[in-house]
Image: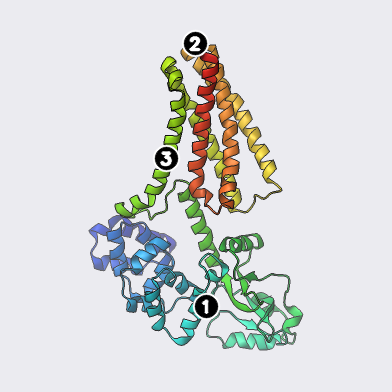
């Protein structure tokens, strides 16, 4: 089917489903790929989403579940029977089945496993023994390996005897008699070299396998930097236990980007989550923001006598705090991106800080002149204009310190800076902005 026709079918499903019969919806779903159906589910309110999913064939459900985000996936899985779920995941790759089963309650997970063949169950149980955010949580045990003494002719015949090669098989792996990883061979090299050569003569030993306990973000970085499609996974003893492929790594990158984007606002929810669930996911960080707002208010309260005497300070002080907050968020975003991409380390952190400091000083000088001029023509007070200019520079400098070091400190405390960083840096710039402006006003205007 042409891409344009598929897109039209998807748009019709999303925009006109309320006007279509169930048979018409089912017909449209059959014309879409699993990823397009997953997109349709994620783009629909809960009631419509459940209807779409209920109209799928059981053998289609597994592929669609794999392409869904974790929250929606769990929501749909909770509404189908164990028998239906076991049938839905039957044809999936082991790592895809692991992704679905690892989020289930243990008793239900064991029930699903008991309905599988012994071979499939053992392969999936291997993946379930590793934490979700490690290489072990991504690995696929469906792997092809050969010995270094085999001839290329033997290897080619072995590959031809397979019913089909596992998805994304761009290489096979070389192991010794103890199944320890010693190298790999690209499929393209097997096809083009002479059949009488041995595996040992053409295999590559330059690529390092991935350790099963490595963090999944480290795995994503390895794939990105080395531009690879698949990689061997070994255990602590060096034995080959599986492989990771690019499709699983892309899922990690997408989920990480999604979490960072939502985390900046303290949100982690499905776009069409019910009001109660959405409220629960947001209330904690709203409460934290409320607490920091009280801290800022207490800072202002220290200078209530000054504000009573010079009322127009209350008009101007939000300018200083707001500018500092925006500047801190800009720096925070740069640092979070650097941390996520593992570009920031102890050797370049000082340079980055100096760069951000120079930017803030340059911006501070320009903006302070602008704010000072507006303040002077507004209130005709040269001292007040100078004070707000100096306070603005002070707060912009503090925004750099907060924006650079708060996420670094939070990460060392094992906290996610994408979620809590913005709350902390905004509080810092609010408090310092009020302290600097009202403090200078107390000294020079009272």
The front one of 208 and 165 is: 208
Q: Secondary structure at mark 3?
A: helix
Q: Residues within 10 Å of mark 3 (few under 14, many from 20)?
A: some
Q: Secondary structure at mark 2?
A: loop
Q: Which residue is drawn at the image coordinates 66% and 71% (left, top)?
A: 209
Q: Tell me, yes or no, whether the two marked residues, 3 and 2, touch with CB atoms within 8 Å.
A: no
Q: Which residue is drawn at the image coordinates 61% and 49% (left, top)?
A: 338
Q: Is residue 124 above or below residue 214?
A: below
Q: Quadrant of residue 3?
A: bottom left
The front one of 298 and 166 is: 298
Provide residue 25's location: percent of width, then percent of height: 28, 65
Which of the labelled discs sits on residue 240, or is there none?
Answer: none
Q: Earlier in the sequence, mark 2 or mark 1?
A: 1
Reading the image, the residue beneath label 3 is 291
Q: Tell me, yes or no, whether the two marked residues, 1 and 3, touch with CB atoms within 8 Å.
A: no
Q: Which tag is nearer the camera, tag 3 or tag 2? A: 3
- How far apart marks 2 and 1 lie (CA) works out to 75 Å
Q: Is residue 286 above or below residue 374?
A: below
Provide residue 96's location: percent of width, then percent of height: 47, 72
- How far apart marks 1 and 3 lie (CA) works out to 45 Å
Q: Earlier in the sequence, mark 3 or mark 2?
A: 3
Q: Quadrant of residue 110?
A: bottom left
Q: Is residue 391 above or below residue 92?
A: above
Q: Residues within 10 Å of mark 1 (few under 14, many from 20)?
A: some
* 75 sits left or right of 377 in the view: left
Provide residue 184's location: percent of width, then percent of height: 68, 76
Q: Secondary structure at mark 1?
A: helix
Reading the image, the residue beneath label 1 is 126
Reading the image, the residue beneath label 2 is 380
Provide residue 50's location: percent of width, then percent of height: 29, 64
Q: Residue furthest right?
A: 201
Q: Report the quarter where the N terminus lies.
A: bottom left
């Amino acid at each position: 089917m042409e891409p344009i026709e598929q897109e039209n079918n998807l748009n019709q499903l999303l925009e006109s489903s309320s006007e279509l019969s169930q048979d018409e919806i089912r017909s449209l779903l059959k014309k879409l790929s699993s990823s397009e159906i997953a997109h349709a589910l994620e783009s629909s309110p809960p009631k419509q989403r459940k209807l779409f999913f209920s109209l799928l064939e059981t053998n289609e459900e597994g592929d669609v579940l794999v392409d869904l985000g974790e929250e929606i996936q769990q929501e749909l899985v909770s509404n189908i029977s164990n028998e239906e779920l076991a049938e839905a995941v039957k044809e999936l790759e082991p790592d895809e089945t692991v992704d679905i089963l690892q989020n289930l309650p243990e008793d239900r997970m064991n029930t699903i496993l008991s309905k599988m063949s012994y071979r499939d169950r053992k392969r999936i149980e291997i993946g379930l023994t590793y934490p979700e955010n490690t290489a072990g949580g991504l690995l696929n045990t469906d792997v092809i390996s050969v010995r270094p003494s085999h001839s290329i002719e033997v290897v080619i015949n072995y590959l031809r005897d397979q019913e089909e090669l596992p998805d994304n098989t761009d290489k096979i792996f070389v192991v010794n008699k103890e199944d320890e990883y010693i190298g790999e061979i690209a499929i393209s090299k097997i096809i083009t070299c002479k059949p009488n050569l041995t595996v040992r003569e053409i295999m590559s030993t330059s690529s390092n396998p991935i350790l099963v306990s490595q963090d999944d973000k480290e795995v994503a970085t390895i794939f990105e930097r080395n531009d690879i499609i698949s990689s061997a996974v070994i255990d602590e003893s060096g034995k080959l236990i599986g492989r990771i492929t690019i499709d699983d790594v892309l899922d990690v990158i997408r989920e990480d980007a999604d979490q960072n984007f939502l985390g900046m606002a303290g949100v982690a929810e499905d776009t069409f989550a019910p009001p109660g669930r959405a409220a629960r996911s947001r209330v904690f960080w709203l409460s934290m923001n409320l607490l920091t707002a009280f801290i800022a208010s207490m800072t202002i309260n220290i200078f209530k006598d000054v504000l009573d005497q010079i009322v127009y300070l209350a008009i101007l002080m939000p300018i200083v705090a707001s500018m500092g907050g925006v500047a801190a968020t800009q720096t925070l975003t740069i640092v979070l991106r650097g941390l996520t991409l593992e570009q920031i380390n102890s050797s370049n952190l000082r340079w980055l800080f100096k760069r951000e400091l120079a930017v803030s000083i340059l911006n501070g000088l320009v903006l302070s002149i602008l704010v000072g001029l507006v303040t002077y023509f507004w209130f005709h007070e040269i001292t007040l204009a100078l004070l707000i200019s100096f306070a603005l520079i002070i707060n912009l400098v503090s925004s750099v310190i907060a924006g650079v070091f708060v996420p670094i400190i939070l990460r060392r405390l094992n906290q996610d800076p994408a979620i809590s960083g913005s709350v902390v840096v905004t509080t810092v710039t609010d408090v310092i902005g009020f302290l600097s402006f009202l403090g200078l006003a107390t000294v020079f205007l009272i």
